[in-house]
Image (spheres, rainbow, N blue to C red):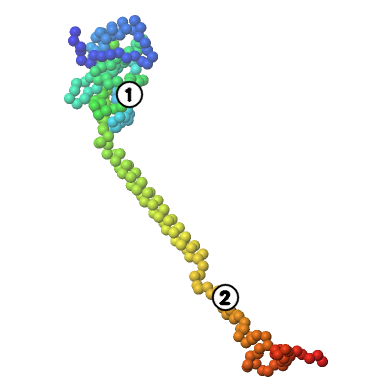
C-alpha cells in the first residue's frame, strides 16, 4: 500500500511515557486504522474557531510563538495541526489522539521544534523564515469533522527589522554626547588647576632686588719694618744728630751717664 498524504511518520508520547507491548500493538493498530487519516465523515455543521498567535505578527527570527485555538468545547477525540506554505501542499505537523495512552503523532512538517501543550495548542521555538505560512487545526470526533481554524504567522529576519536601527543610533548619539561632555569637564578642570598652580608660585616668590651687604673694611697697609738706617755702631753718632753729652772713656766716645744729684 502506498503512503497516503498527511499520514503520520512517527509516534511521540508525553514525557516519561514508556510504551509496553500492549501500547506498541495499539500504536500499530492506530497507525493502520483509517480513522487516523482525514475524517471520513463530515459533521452536519462545521464550527469555525479562532486561532491566535502569541506574540502577534511579525515575529522576529529566532523567537518563539504559541498558536492557541479558541475552542469552546472539549468534546473531540483528535486534533491535528497542519502547515501550508506558499506553493506547497498542506502537510501535517502533529496530531494528538485522546485515549488511555494519549498518543502524539508527527507528520512531514514536523521540525523537532514543535511541542503540543494544553488545549491542543502548539509551541514553536527558534523560529526561522521557513516557518512562515498558514497553520490550520482540525478537530474531529470518531471520524466526524467537527471544527477547523487557521492562523498565519510571518517570521522576519534580522536584516529587515528596521525598528532596531533607530534605538541603536540613539544610543550611539547619547554615548558621543556624554563622552564629549566628560572631555570638556576634564579639560576645564585641568585649565583651572594650571592657573591655580601658577598663581600660587607667583604669590610665594620673593622679590628679586639687589641686596646690598656691608663691605668689609679695607685691609690695613702692612706695617713697615723698623728702619735701622740711623743706627750706628756703639759710640758712633750720626753727623746730623745734635751733639750728645758724651764722654770719652778710654778714647771711646760714650754717651754721658746721668749724674747723681
Is 24 placed above or below 214 here?
Answer: above
Residue 242 seen in this snapshot: yes
Q: Is disc 1 surrounded by few (<14), some (14 to 19) or many (20+) residues within 10 Å?
A: some
Task: Tell me where residue 104 sits by quadrant.
Answer: top left
Disc 2: which residue? 216
Q: Position of residue 93 (x, y in %)?
A: 27, 19
The single residue placed furthest to the bottom in the displayed view is 243
Q: What residue sits 29% from the left and 32% below the top?
A: 60
Which quadrant does the N terminus fall into?
Answer: top left
Specify whether 78 is left or right of 190: left
Q: What residue sits 44% from the left and 61% below the top?
A: 195
Q: Position of residue 98 (x, y in %)?
A: 33, 13
Disc 1: which residue? 123
- Say the numbered circle drawn on residue 53: none
Q: Position of residue 127 (x, y in %)?
A: 29, 27
Q: What residue sits 35% from the left and 20% below the top?
A: 117
Which residue is more in the foreground, 169 or 198?
A: 198
Amino acid at each position: 500500500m502506498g503512503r497516503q498524504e498527511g499520514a503520520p511518520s512517527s509516534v511521540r508520547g508525553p514525557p516519561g511515557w514508556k510504551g509496553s507491548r500492549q501500547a506498541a500493538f495499539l500504536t500499530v493498530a492506530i497507525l493502520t486504522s483509517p480513522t487516523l487519516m482525514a475524517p471520513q465523515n463530515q459533521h452536519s455543521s462545521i464550527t469555525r474557531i479562532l486561532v491566535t498567535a502569541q506574540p502577534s505578527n511579525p515575529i522576529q527570527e529566532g523567537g518563539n510563538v504559541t498558536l492557541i485555538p479558541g475552542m469552546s468545547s472539549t468534546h473531540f477525540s483528535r486534533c491535528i495541526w497542519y502547515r501550508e506554505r506558499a506553493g506547497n501542499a498542506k502537510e501535517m505537523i502533529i496530531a494528538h489522539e485522546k485515549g488511555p495512552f494519549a498518543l502524539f503523532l508527527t507528520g512531514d512538517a514536523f521540525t523537532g521544534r514543535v511541542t503540543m501543550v494544553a488545549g491542543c495548542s502548539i509551541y514553536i521555538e527558534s523560529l526561522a523564515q521557513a516557518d512562515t505560512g498558514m497553520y490550520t487545526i482540525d478537530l474531529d470526533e470518531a471520524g466526524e469533522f467537527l471544527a477547523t481554524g487557521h492562523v498565519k504567522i510571518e517570521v522576519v529576519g534580522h536584516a529587515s527589522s528596521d525598528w532596531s536601527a533607530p534605538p541603536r543610533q540613539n544610543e550611539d548619539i547619547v554615548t558621543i554626547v556624554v563622552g564629549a561632555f566628560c572631555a570638556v569637564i576634564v579639560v576645564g578642570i585641568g585649565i583651572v588647576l594650571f592657573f591655580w598652580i601658577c598663581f600660587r608660585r607667583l604669590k610665594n616668590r620673593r622679590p628679586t632686588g639687589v641686596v646690598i651687604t656691608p663691605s668689609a673694611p679695607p685691609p690695613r697697609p702692612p706695617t713697615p719694618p723698623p728702619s735701622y738706617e740711623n743706627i750706628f755702631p756703639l759710640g758712633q753718632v750720626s753727623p746730623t744728630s745734635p751733639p750728645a753729652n758724651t764722654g770719652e772713656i778710654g778714647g771711646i766716645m760714650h754717651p754721658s751717664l746721668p749724674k747723681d744729684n
